[in-house]
Amino acid sequence: MFEQLPTVPTSQELLDKAFRRAARAEDNESMVRNAGNIISDNISNLIRKFPSFDNLPPFYREMADIIVGVDAMRISLSRLDWASNQVRLITRESMGKMKHSRTQDTMSVRKAAFGRISSVMRSIEKDLLFLNDARNMLRQMPTIDPALPTVLIAGYPNVGKSSFIARVTGARPEIASYPFTTRGVYVGHFYRDDLKYQVVDTPGLLDRPDEERNDIERQAMAALNHLPGVILFILDPSEHCGYPLQSQLRLAEDMKSWTRLPLLVVANKTDIKRYEEVPEMSTETGQGVNEVQEKLISLLAAERARLKSEEAEQPA
């Protein structure tokens, strides 16, 4: 979604580019015109390459807001638009003065124009730096195909979500034995009978109100609220994750109450402690993982059939 965002240059890089090109011109009027056009065009092109946040799919818009801040990006982009217009205005005014100036005076007009343009560019330096940081963070977001059958993995931190996606897809998200290891949303894929499946590893959630969730948890909620598919909720009955089983069960029940998606609760780490109330597996040994994967495939097939039936019943 954000892979094509360009690198955002600094104000000095834009000025250097413009003034180098301007130096090749034959007269002061052409120098001002070339420098002004290069800067204003580069800024305008940069603004156009950022997406319209109102038209983004809800998942990507919410993720962008969590990771960077949509309003902050809008403000910085609007300041860039102001700068582009100011440079165009300075260019027009300066060229108008040159038309009515003696030849020896055009140099002073050109120098004044370059000074004013430089001042405008320096005023948006922080915006350019912010947008380049935003670009770097947004480009790290995974591309999620809503057309693919999708498994969304949920649960408390460190219950084995990342280990499961590594087992079934070969994707290697960061895995470690401390809470909130998953710092973002990861995606892996597997094939079954020539059909491609998508597995989304979400950050760990805690059993607490939405207003108390941190940005890592909000990324998980964005995926669970906006992406289609089925949810695999993983429990750790051994409590080696650092959280009581009862808290994990409450979160699972709470999620069942608000999610619109089919939800499968599975107990992991059963090589350490069994929990026969739900299907069991061990992502450490691989025991039960294939069986869980088959249950998820069946749930996805049933969900896709249900959605197709609903579509067919809708009036044309």
Image (spheres, rainbow, N blue to C red):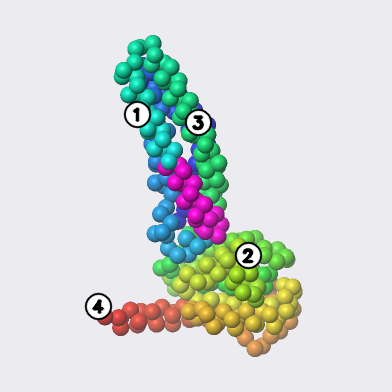
Q: In whole angstroms, how far apart are the C-alphas of marks 1 and 4?
A: 55 Å
The answer to whether mark 4 and mark 2 are in CB contact below 8 A is no
In terms of sequence position, does the residue under pointer 1 or pointer 4 come before the other? 1
Q: In whole angstroms, how far apart are the C-alphas of marks 3 and 4?
A: 59 Å
Q: Going 53% across and 49% down the picture, which residue do you hit? A: 134
As displayed, is residue 278 above or below residue 268? below
Most prominent secondary structure in the magenta stretch?
Answer: helix
Identify the residue position indicated by label 4 in the image: 316
Residue 267 position, x and y percent, is 65, 80
Q: Quadrant of residue 157?
A: bottom right
Identify the residue position indicated by label 2 in the image: 214
Identify the residue position indicated by label 1 in the image: 92
Question: For the residues carrying marks 1 and 4, which lies nearer the camera in this image?
Answer: 1
Secondary element under disc 4, as helix, strand or loop, is loop
Task: Give the residue type that dot 2 points to.
Answer: Asn
Circle number at residue 119: 3
